[in-house]
Every structure is written in structure tokens, then in C-alpha cells.
Image (tube, helix red, strand yellow):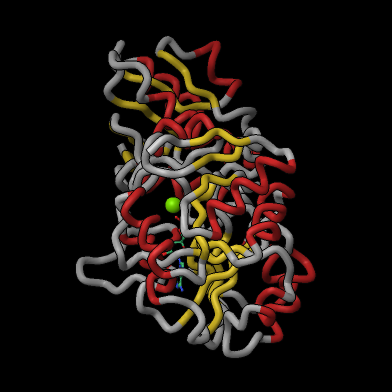
């Protein structure tokens, strides 16, 4: 299959919509990361997403809509909770996914056999244009091979998906850079299953009590059931080893500089003058939005240097958007953390 490279113009958006309507796969830009979209109401189209990504069939997909009214218009859920309306008013369009009890309209391929469905209204105008033109909600996980860092440019989608999907629409680099915040409204107390661009603090301001699932910062115990199936897989990982260091700034510099030529630093701008190894910077210290935006691209760049075999990063902060960076980085590191403060 030849993968078409499409742009943001009327004729290309029409082409993308036609491909989607006839059951094909299109890489689409969103403000979080690039998505790999198919018609969410067509089970066999959705099954192709799993094949192209090599995604385990028990990991459900997010359904993307172009306006709040689409939930009712397409009959996606059995009822819309009041909390969903409140959250939508504040954070949609935007990087928030809400899980609700699903209706029979949603194919099993989308919900992976669960009785719930995850729904998001993306902030990227091109994404909404494509959904509207297709005339159907779109199921879209991140457009990477399963397990790899998510793509934040059209070129990275091509790296993973060339020849496997019908088209990619180029919408430039993604603004948020990490996937959406996922909150379930199907539990008694709403619970964050995955942190993202909308922070836990912001959610609590709007709907009060919000729990954070233990899988957000920790590793699932052997045999433990994941509330969000995606959390149980090794994820977001480059091919080289990533190690997190729990330590202060000076200890970080000294430790990494002692590691020699095959080591790299996944660091901040301020560290660069003091480091003697190759540096991959996530931006200024404390600028968590920048760290989120650049994380996946820097992880992918690590694999472009065959002389490297390990990258060291500091354990991120869990405040605000920092929690989303922490969640991705600790999985990229396979939960390998060295506590230098203990030594
Ligand atoms: P991705 O689209 O690759 O960013 O992954 C979507 C994430 O949302 C995965 O971690 C899924 O496990 C999670 N997810 C999607 N639908 C549901 C659902 N109905 N219940 C729980 N988690 C879900
Ligand atoms: Mg993903």
C-alpha cells in the first residue's frame, strides 16, 4: 500500500474523509499526539488499526468527536453524566478523554469488550475538520507502532506506518506533545487513569473529588487488573535503555559525566554547559509544558545515535503537567529508577 501524504486544504481533507468513510486508515494531527484514525462505528475498519500498530486487542481505543452533541447524535453512550457536561464546558475542545457507559452502537473492537467507551473532542482544528467531513466519530489511538514513543510530527508517523496505512495529514508539530488525560466517570468517584495536558488539579477545581489510579505513577503488581488496559504494557520506550535518577542537580551532572561515551543525558537546557556527554534537552528547568511537548521527539532521537546505549534523566516532578511527563518517562525507563539520595 502506498501511504499518501496529505495537507490542510479542502481537497486533501475530502480525500482523507473519503478514505475513512470506506473503512481505511488515516494518520491525523491532534493537539496531543498524531492519531491513527478509522471510522469508530465500523468494527472491521477499527480492527485494521490494531493490525497496523501491532496493538494488543484488549487495549481499547478513544473515540474522537467534532462537537459535544455528537455523543447523543451518534448514540455513543447510555446516558451522559452531569460531570461530563461540566468537564466538557471547561476542557473541550482539548486534551481530556472521558470514559462513560457505552451503548450498543460502539463496536466491541473499540471498547475491547469493556462496557464503557472513552470519548474526546480534540482541540486541533484539522482533526475536527476531518471528523466533520467523514460524518462519523473516529477511533484513534496514537499513530506509533505499539510500545514505541508516540509521534508528534507527520514525519514520525511515516517512520512507523509507511506502507501500512492509507494516508497521513500533515498538521505540523503537536502542541501538547503527550496523550490526553483519561478520566473515568463510570466509577462512583471519578478517577484519572492516565495523566495528560489537563491536570488533576484542574479537574478537581471543576468536579471536586477525583482519584488518581495507582497505575499512573507505579507499576502494576503481578496479576493485578488494570483499570486502563494500556497501563499494563511497556510503553513509550526507545530502543536504548533509559534510566531515571532520583537526585539533586549537581549529583545528576556528576553521575552522568562519570558514565562515558555510550551514555546520553535527557536533560534541561541549563544542564548542557556542565555535561560532557551527548545532551537531549526537554527545555528549560521547571517548564513542564515544554518537557511534555518535546519528550517523545527526544526519546525518538536517542535511537538515531548507534554509539549510545543508555540515557539518564532525572525523576520528573509530579506537579501539574509534570505528572504526565513522569508517567511516560517511568514507563520508557521500564520503571528503572536509581535513588542516589539513598547512597
Ligand atoms: P492511546 O489511544 O494509544 O493513547 O491509548 C488510549 C488509552 O485509553 C489506553 O491506555 C486505553 O487503555 C485507555 N482506554 C480507552 N478506552 C478505555 C476504556 N473504555 N476504559 C479504560 N481505559 C480506556
Ligand atoms: Mg498510544
Does residue 283 sit above or below 326 in this rendering? Answer: above
Confirm whether residue 245 shows in the render. no
Residue 32 is situated, as x and y percent measured from the top left of the image, at 60, 48
Residue under the point 35% across and 16% down: 305
Residue under the point 30% across and 74% down: 225
Does residue 88 sit above or below 238 in this rendering? Answer: below
Quadrant assignment for the C terminus: top left
Quadrant of res 93: bottom right
Does residue 85 sit above or below 199 in this rendering? Answer: below
Residue under the point 32% across and 61% down: 232
In this view, the residue in front, 332 or 36, is: 36
Q: Is residue 285 left or right of residue 296?
A: right
Residue 182 is situated, as x and y percent measured from the top left of the image, at 54, 65
In this view, the residue in front, 131 or 143, is: 131
Residue under the point 48% across and 22% down: 280
Residue 171 is situated, as x and y percent measured from the top left of the image, at 65, 37
- Residue extending furthest toward the right: 89
Quadrant assignment for the N terminus: top left
Amino acid at each position: 500500500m502506498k501511504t499518501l501524504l496529505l495537507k490542510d486544504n479542502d481537497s486533501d481533507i475530502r480525500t482523507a474523509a473519503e478514505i475513512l468513510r470506506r473503512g481505511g486508515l488515516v494518520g491525523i494531527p491532534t493537539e496531543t499526539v498524531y492519531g491513527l484514525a478509522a471510522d469508530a462505528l465500523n468494527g472491521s475498519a477499527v480492527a485494521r488499526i490494531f493490525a497496523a500498530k501491532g496493538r494488543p486487542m484488549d487495549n481499547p481505543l478513544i473515540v474522537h468527536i467534532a462537537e459535544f452533541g455528537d455523543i447523543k447524535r451518534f448514540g455513543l453512550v447510555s446516558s451522559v453524566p452531569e460531570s461530563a457536561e461540566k468537564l466538557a464546558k471547561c476542557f473541550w475542545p482539548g486534551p481530556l478523554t472521558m470514559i462513560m457507559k457505552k451503548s450498543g452502537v460502539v463496536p466491541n473492537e473499540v471498547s475491547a469488550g469493556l462496557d464503557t467507551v472513552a470519548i474526546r473532542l480534540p482541540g486541533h482544528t484539522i482533526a475536527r475538520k476531518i471528523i466533520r467531513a467523514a460524518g462519523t466519530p473516529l477511533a484513534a489511538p496514537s499513530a506509533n507502532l505499539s510500545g514505541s514513543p508516540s509521534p508528534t510530527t507527520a514525519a514520525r508517523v511515516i517512520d512507523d506506518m509507511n506502507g501500512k496505512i492509507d494516508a497521513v495529514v500533515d498538521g505540523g508539530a503537536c502542541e501538547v506533545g503527550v496523550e490526553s488525560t483519561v478520566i473515568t466517570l463510570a466509577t462512583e468517584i471519578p478517577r484519572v487513569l492516565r495523566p495528560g495536558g489537563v491536570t488533576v488539579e484542574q479537574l478537581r477545581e471543576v468536579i471536586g473529588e477525583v482519584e488518581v489510579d495507582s497505575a499512573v505513577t507505579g507499576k502494576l503488581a503481578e496479576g493485578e487488573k488494570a483499570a486502563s488496559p494500556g497501563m499494563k504494557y511497556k510503553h513509550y520506550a526507545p530502543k536504548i535503555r533509559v534510566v531515571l535518577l532520583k537526585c539533586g542537580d549537581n549529583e545528576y551532572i556528576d553521575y552522568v559525566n562519570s558514565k562515558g561515551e555510550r551514555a546520553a543525558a535527557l536533560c534541561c537546557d541549563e544542564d548542557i554547559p556542565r555535561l560532557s556527554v551527548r545532551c537531549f534537552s526537554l527545555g528549560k528547568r521547571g517548564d513542564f509544558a515544554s518537557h511534555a511537548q518535546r519528550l517523545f521527539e527526544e526519546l525518538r532521537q536517542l535511537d538515531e545515535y548507534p554509539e549510545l546505549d543508555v540515557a539518564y534523566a532525572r525523576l520528573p516532578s509530579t506537579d501539574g503537567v509534570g505528572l504526565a511527563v513522569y508517567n511516560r518517562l517511568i514507563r520508557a525507563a521500564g520503571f528503572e529508577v536509581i535513588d542516589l539520595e539513598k547512597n
